[in-house]
Amino acid sequence: MALMGGFVFPEEARALYNCFTCPLNTNKGGGDDEVVGEIASLIGALFDAEASTTMMRRAEIAHRHADYDTLKATVLKQDARLNTVEWKSAKTASLLHSGMESGVVRTSQEKSEAIVPGRCHGILYGYKPTLCWTVLILAVSVGLNVHYSYQGSLGFGQLDGRTAVEASPILPGPGSLLAYRAVALLLTCVPLAGAVAFYRQKRKEEGEELFMGGFEVLLIFCTLWTWCWKAMYFFLATGLSIMYVAFGWVPPACVAGGLWIIFDIAFGTAWLVFWAVWLFLLPFAWYAGHQWVVDELLTPLPFYFHNANVLLMLTELVFSRWTVNLEHCVFPVYFCLAYLYWNWWLYSKIGVWIYFFLDYDRPSSVPVCLTLVAITVASFEFGAWLANLLK
């Protein structure tokens, strides 16, 4: 390259410049024709160089465009992958049998629809106000529990160990109660095993890791929490009935009292799940136009989980010697609060509410929680009335 007059000239341009600025070399054989030919060749070389430079620049621009397109495709692919991961995180809340509980799960699209805080947010509802409400409910429940205990109205002091294993007058004897409890144990455990197996299969088909072998699905939904609790009750009750029928062993009062508490929790939460579905999930899904949610909640297995629990516990109440004391309503309240706090922790991990009505950022969160507590208490009153009527 040569610098002339402040401009950078390629070698071909420099030679052309010399041809016009220097005297013609007439001593050469060709004379002017030779000079003209030299000038023409230099002009051709100059244009070739310019064309080569242009092609190089175009190639460089095309290469940059190709790099941009590749980068754009990579970003779009990464964004699609992140959206897929987010969707799968949201669907963690919908893990059960083709979305068995998907009616209570907010998808990633619904998650993106932020709730606009109202004027009372942070005062009447929100995380801190709702936490205060739940702590107040817990404190009242504990206070009532202590009061009933000192008053002696819980009934544990007068409890006979045979109450846990003797049948009501409706049945011929404790053997019949044992038979029912064994059947109820199967009717409780088999659907749970099916839910775990179905979940495991679906996760493997999607290539997802199972950190608990599929049993983690039992930790997500309140419905399955209550069914696991019922399975524990019927397992223990069946075992005590076997010991009593086969060996005449009468459980001590403390064991019978513990089983009574487990029964109270199973009975109260069965009604809680039943009414939550029929009073909240189905009506709200229908009102919002989510017909697919209504259809899924009414499919056989979800329908069984949300309704058979009441039948199993009512039958146990009628066939056994158990009674339902209104003072025992504090025990299922403890269970419900435990799941509520667990649900909050789960939300902090996956960013999705399993049940929309437990979202503390909704204005309806506190009234709904109070309503569910009232339903639990009312269920005990109804259970006591029904047991006395049938017995």
Image (spheres, grey):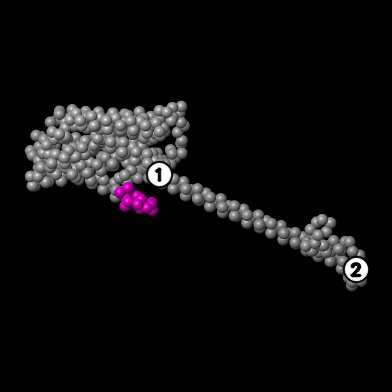
Seen from the viewer's position, the closer of residues 211 and 16 is 211
**Left or right position of 348 against 190:** right
- Dot 1: what SS? helix
Which residue lies at the image location 11% right of the left edge and 35% below the top edge? 168
**Left or right position of 82 against 283:** right
N-terminal-most mark, 1 or 2? 2
Q: Within 10 Å of the Cα at label 1, are there few (<14), some (14-19), or many (20+) other Cα atoms?
A: few
Which residue lies at the image location 46% right of the left edge and 27% below the top edge? 119
Q: Residue 295: image x %, image y %?
A: 33, 37
Q: What number of labels is visible?
A: 2
> Quick check: is 202 in the magenta stretch?
yes
Instruction: Name the residue that disc number 2 marks.
Output: 25
**Left or right position of 276 against 363:** left
In the image, residue 93 above or below residue 150: below
- Dot 2: what SS? loop
Quadrant (top left/top right/bottom left/bottom right) for the C terminus: top left
Instruction: Name the residue that disc number 1 marks.
Output: 349
* Amino acid at circle 1: Lys
Magenta residue span = 199-216
> Quick check: is 366 in the magenta stretch?
no
* Amino acid at circle 2: Asn
Q: Residue 187: image x %, image y %?
A: 21, 43
Q: Work out which residue is located at the far front of the displayed protein and give it.
A: 150
Seen from the viewer's position, the closer of residues 344 and 71 is 344
Look at discs 1 and 2 and give the one toward the viewer: 1
Q: Residue 3: image x %, image y %?
A: 81, 59
Looking at the image, can residue 373 be seen? no
Q: In the rendered image, which quarter is residue 139 located in?
A: top left
In the image, residue 118 above or below residue 296: above
